[in-house]
Image (cartoon, rainbow, N blue to C red):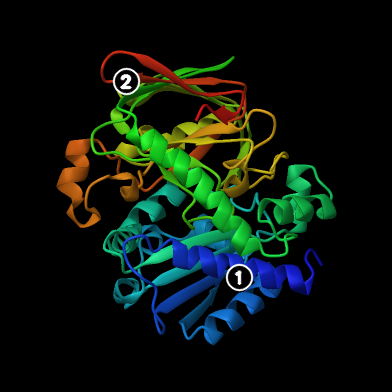
Amino acid sequence: MFFTKTQNEKYADVLIWALETARRNGKVKPYDSVLLRSDLSAMPLVRAVYAKLIALRYQVILRFNAPEDFSKEFYLHADDKQLAFIAGGEKEFQQSLNGLIVIRAPEDLMFLKKADPSRIAQSAVAHQPLREILDMREQKGFFSWTMCNYPTLELAQKAGLSPKEYANQVARACFLNEKDPVKKWQEVTRQITEIGKWLSSLPINTLHVVSRHMDFEVLLGEKRRFMAGGGCNIPSFEIFTSPDWRGTRGIYYADLSSYRSGNYVKGVRLEFEKGRVIKANAEQGADFVRKMLAMDKGAAQIGEFSLTDRRFSKINKFMADILYDENFGGKYGNCHIAIGASYADTFSGPQAKLDKKLKEKLGFNTSSLHWDLINTEDKTVTARLKDGSSQLIYEKGQFRY
């Protein structure tokens, strides 16, 4: 309905390239186990990905997500024991997994609207150990993952676009109309990686963001690097790092709306002091925002800071999907922060050495939450260097590289 057979084949090629590219500290091998997890509505793409993975001699485990009404029943009626339940053998399964491809194709973005956000958070916290297993395997080079979106009528409707317009945005963003999308991704990744290396080479102390609604500063922290593309998420044009959460201060504002756990949130305004959110508000969904910030100790702290250059991203519409919205190009590019969990691969030292104790020492944030909040305003980003000087690194939606 949304893509031709050729476009689905090209999309599958891109996802497998992304999975293999994302194995930064190791090498993908034949007979590695790959979990292909998808919503039912993405079946045309799932078929294409599955066939290609089998042809490449991966061991494929196929899982489909429960329809939204099943999840709604769970979060509305499960008791505490059910919310925390982890099936027998699941930890062992995660410990042996080498790859994960997630294809999201939601049919209802508001299905959890009546569910208590604290119950959703309770389940997320209980399942955090499973995510930590995969994080450690990724750090050691045994595991990689990628994620994408497949268009649905629901996504198009919530984004205020026709199904054709929505599908065209996805196709443009993922280069599915190119003769060789993988080659195009390789070139774009090379370009944004160069910018990431340039940023990593600068002796940055803090990053100061100023726009119409923001005056915001983050402390980069020690042993940090900027990452770009690299396969995790398709599309991905962002250049990001996980700063030292303890040095966050000022006002951050997300002008781009978002859907999360059945809630629509608009105009989020966060005030940080000494690394933590001390005041949170929103034009719509403020109570939900505050409940998310109370999920656990790290939920009210920053886990990511990111910038996207408008020259690379073709996304210029609100997509009602954070995966796309965090890569918004448009007129002024975007910056986004994530409240919650940090990314271990932004540590500039040997990944295997970044244990829990070192993460805490360096100010890498830990949380069951990771929520990207996006600002698309015209802005300047100034790096304050360790020698006390300043350098403008981003304006009018572009890096000054």
Q: Is residue 194 left or right of residue 218?
A: right
Out of 365 and 223, give the one closest to the viewer: 223
Task: First in sequence, mark 2 or 1: give its number.
Answer: 1
Say the numbered circle drawn on residue 352. Answer: none
| Crowd around label 2: few <14 · some 14–19 · many ≥20 (10 Å) | some
Dot 2 lies on which element?
Answer: strand
Q: Residue at x 52, y 42 (%)?
A: 238
Look at mark 1 in the image and give the residue it sits on.
Answer: 13
Q: Quadrant of residue 283?
A: top right
- Type of the residue with mark 2: Leu
Q: Is residue 94 visible?
A: yes
Out of 290 and 7, give the one closest to the viewer: 7
- Type of the residue with mark 1: Asp
Position in image of residue 87 (x %, y %): 36, 73
Position in image of residue 208 (x %, y %): 42, 19
Residue 68 in the image: above or below residue 96: above
Q: Is residue 168 left or right of residue 271?
A: right
Look at mark 2 in the image and give the residue it sits on.
Answer: 385
Position in image of residue 309 (x %, y %): 58, 35
Q: Is residue 248 left or right of residue 228?
A: left
Q: Residue at x 62, y 70 (%)?
A: 12
Dot 1 lies on which element?
Answer: helix
